[in-house]
Image (tube, grey):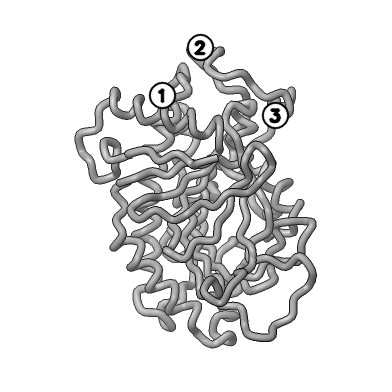
Amino acid sequence: MKLPVIDFASCAIRNKNISTKDLKSVGESIVKAFHSAGFVYLKDTGISENDVKKLNKTAKQFFDLPMEKKKKYDINQECFGYIGIGVEKNSALRPADYKEGFDIPGSAFVPGRTIWPDKEVAEYSYVMKEFGDHCRFLSTQILGAISLGLGLKDKEYLMKCHSRMNDERNLTTLRTHYYPRIPDKCSFEPGQVRLGEHTDFGSFTILFQDKVGGLQVKASNGEYVDATPIPGTALVNIGDALQFWTQGRLKSTEHRILMPKTAEENVERRSIAYFVQANNDVLLSELQYENNDIFSPREASQVSDEPVTVLQYLKKQYKSINLQSLDHYSE
């Protein structure tokens, strides 16, 4: 399996003259890729390499802090903050993941709600919020393209369902990842990896990789293929909620990051993920299409007779792998 690359320049976030024709053409290509592979590279999204480098530089300053300073910002009930090595366990069949991260949910974008590590890292909150806003704009463009590509009766429906990204009552999250170099003579439990096999929970994820690579995607034959970093692209993949929402027309695909195999591969790795979620109170009920034959639903992903809200769905998924509890959240 070779992951497709789609030129997104005609619909980029800084393009002020986006036509419905261009958005539909791009959307049809994206939907086709999401149906077959679940992953797609988008080229020229409008988020530049300089934008990515600026954020990674700021994130590195935080991850390079002494542990006692990072621990001051341990992830809290608002799902904001630092995640240390071994805290998350994305695969039930493996030990906890060998990585660090920092989560920034929608509530953190609300003025006065969050204590940021700006004293330790200058302009940390400004850089993160700026990049998060870029990702929100890009997500809106992707949602518009998907809506046209799927042939939804209401072309605005998905965008309305995601209207509260980077705000309260929506769990869309910007996350910075740091995968440290593996120390020499370090012993691990059997099966230890940097990121265990998993699918993402939400609508879709936008990922910006550095040049190191290491991400692998599960192909339809069960084998894993490398999702090699391509400069100037964002790698986008469907999550479980949108697979469920589309009755399996779009495919949520397992992915992982193994441990480095050689000394040359054993270097620090960084990435940025923007996990797109619909608003907490949105019902994952069956979508309405102009043409129901666009793709056949996959039987294993049929929508329930009693639709659940996005928040109810996410609470169940988070508990399944011992992630931060969402119990205190309301719709």
Pick whichever, 32 or 132, lies toward us: 32
Q: Amino acid at mark 3?
A: Ser
- Seen in the picture, residue 119 relative to 103 is either above or below; the reply is below
Mark found first going from the N terminus, 3 or 2: 2
Q: Disc 1 on helix, strand or loop?
A: helix
Q: Are marks 3 and 2 in contact (CB under 8 Å)?
A: no
The residue labelled by disc 1 is 148
Mark found first going from the N terminus, 1 or 2: 1
Pick whichever, 70 or 189, lies toward us: 189
Q: Amino acid at mark 2?
A: Asn
Task: In the rendered structure, find residue 291 and report the number of the disc placed on it.
Answer: 2
On the image, the x and y values in percent for residue 171 come to 55, 50
Q: CA distance from mark 1 to mark 2?
A: 12 Å
- Residue visible at 59% across and 38% down? 281
Pick whichever, 325 or 30, lies toward us: 30
- Residue visible at 20% across and 34% down? 17
Q: Amino acid at mark 1?
A: Leu
Query: Which of the 4 image quarters holds residue 240?
Result: top right
- Residue visible at 39% across and 73% down? 58
